Image: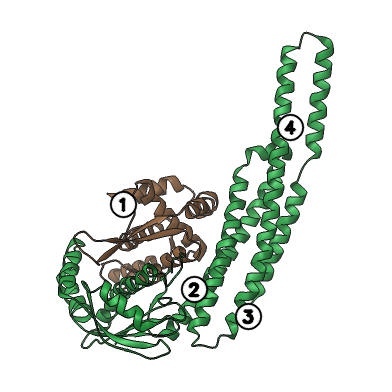
Amino acid sequence: MGAMTRNLSSRLIERKEVTKLDPLTKEYLILFLYDLFDERNIKPSYGEMHRAAKILQDLLEENYNMTMGYKFDTPSLYDIWDNDFQEDLETLEVSIRGVDNRDVLVENTTGYYSHELEPTNHGKSLLKNIGIKELEKYIPNLEAFKEKLEQSIFQ
Amino acid sequence: MVTSVISDVLPYDLDSNKIIEMWKEEISDRYLIEGLSFSEDGTGSFLFSFKEDFINEVIEGYKSKNIPQEKMDIFLSVIFNQTHKVELKDNGIFQVVINVEDLSTEQLEMVEVEAKFQFYHVAKTLVETLRKNSYIGIRPLTLHHISSGDAENLERKLYKNYRKTILLRLKESKVIAMEIRDTLSKIKPFPLGILFKYSLLNIINDVYENYRLMKEFSESELSRIKRIGTLETDKYNEYIPALLKKYDILAERVENMRDLLMSQFQISGVFLGLLGLDFALLSVFFPLLLPKIFLSVSGVILLLILGKYSVRSALKKEVDHLMRYLNEIALID
């Protein structure tokens, strides 16, 4: 009986309501992630962005009961990958030119590339002038959250 | 079977035979092109494979990224150690068909993601050949729209992404318009207070840039989707041009807002300078009665004139117009 009750309560906890963020907020969160890398003069690859976004989503779910709705379980070269997230990254590059994507030859190869991603001035400006304010509506202590996120990503 | 489809690889009116021959030469250290077969209209196909030296480089690349051996083995056997049939179509599509056998669904999905990136880079070398030989202009081709599936899938994906992007930007414009309206109401006294809200101009510049980019994006998407044209194209033949017209109006409204704000900054700046001068002179001539009276009166007059010059209501009107157009756009379907 006791075990049954425990099972039920853990299932109820698992079912705790998680709010799915809207696409625009998701876009600002992606720009926010790029900004973290940019502050350290790092131009992440797609693989690094997927990994960082997974950390961000985990923190959002743990601390704010919010999710970007990615699953990060698409089988790929990397352990952490989500095709929907990849589409959102590419949309940000192509439509509003928020991010520059540079092909970089992997050392000692003639045609095997990696990608270096970097927010453009327009992307940075969108985050600074509009995005941050919008994010603060969902994450009241954005600075503290940023610190926590940085620790998890760059540890 | 996995199919990678990449759009925009070839321009219109191409002489594929000549181009592919040039490309074949340029990439001969990495890729092998065989069995060229092109018709008069520029469409055709060839067999494509990766050369051994290149495959060795790829293995090194995978190792440097710490990719597990079992994943590497799948990519090598399915993507790199096979010969693939590539089709080049007159609509600029570069389509690679990869034969896969005995793979689980998960492995198949993994191959799809990897093939998409690998053939994106292959197709990019073809675009580079075109550029080097002046077949395409200075404006670079984006080559971002790569998809697994057939050309019809790509077209659907393009249209879906286009709609999604437009809705995002619409929502963003509404958020910004409300933010501007809210800020305008809070600035008191407006003609002086606005000088401390320079960020408003930055926001307006961001919105303007968004409309400019959306217009550019819409035009290129319209041309790309039309060119692929495997689906019923009526919906975007109507939808995108209707949006393009609205963008012009939106951009005009935002430009008006920018002009109004700029003129307010200039006038307020000049008056603030004059007031500062007046105050400085007043402090110098404070002991003398006549200059003191004159400077005090002129200071009050300056404040009164400045108080009269406010673009707040004109700006609010522009924001209202902007909101109305944004709502109209939301109704276009």
Q: Secondary structure at mark 1?
A: helix
Mark 2–mark 3 contact, CB under 8 Å?
A: no
Tell if the residue under mark 3 belongs to the same chain as the one under mark 1: no
Image position, residue B70 (x, y; %): 16, 74
Q: Is residue B237 above or below residue B320?
A: below
Q: Callout 1 environment at 10 Å: few (<14), some (14 to 19), or many (20+)?
A: few
Which quadrant is the N terminus of chain A positioned in? bottom left
- Chain depicted in brown: A
Mark 4–mark 2 contact, CB under 8 Å?
A: no
Q: Look at mark 4 in the image and give the residue it sits on.
A: B271
Q: Secondary structure at mark 2?
A: helix
Amino acid carrying mark 2 in the image:
Asn
Q: Numbered disc 4: what chain?
A: B
Q: How many labels sit on residues?
A: 4
Q: Numbered disc 1: what chain?
A: A
Q: CA distance from mark 2 to mark 3?
A: 17 Å
Q: Secondary structure at mark 3?
A: helix
Q: Look at mark 2 in the image and give the residue it sits on.
A: B161
Amino acid carrying mark 4 in the image:
Phe
Q: CA distance from mark 4 to mark 2?
A: 49 Å
Which mark's residue is nearer the viewer, 1 or 4? 4
Q: Look at mark 3 in the image and give the residue it sits on.
A: B238
Q: CA distance from mark 3 to mark 4?
A: 50 Å
Amino acid carrying mark 1 in the image:
Ser
Amino acid carrying mark 3 in the image:
Glu
Q: Secondary structure at mark 4?
A: helix
Q: Colour of chain B?
A: green
Q: Look at mark 1 in the image and give the residue it sits on.
A: A152
Tell if the residue under mark 4 belongs to the same chain as the one under mark 2: yes
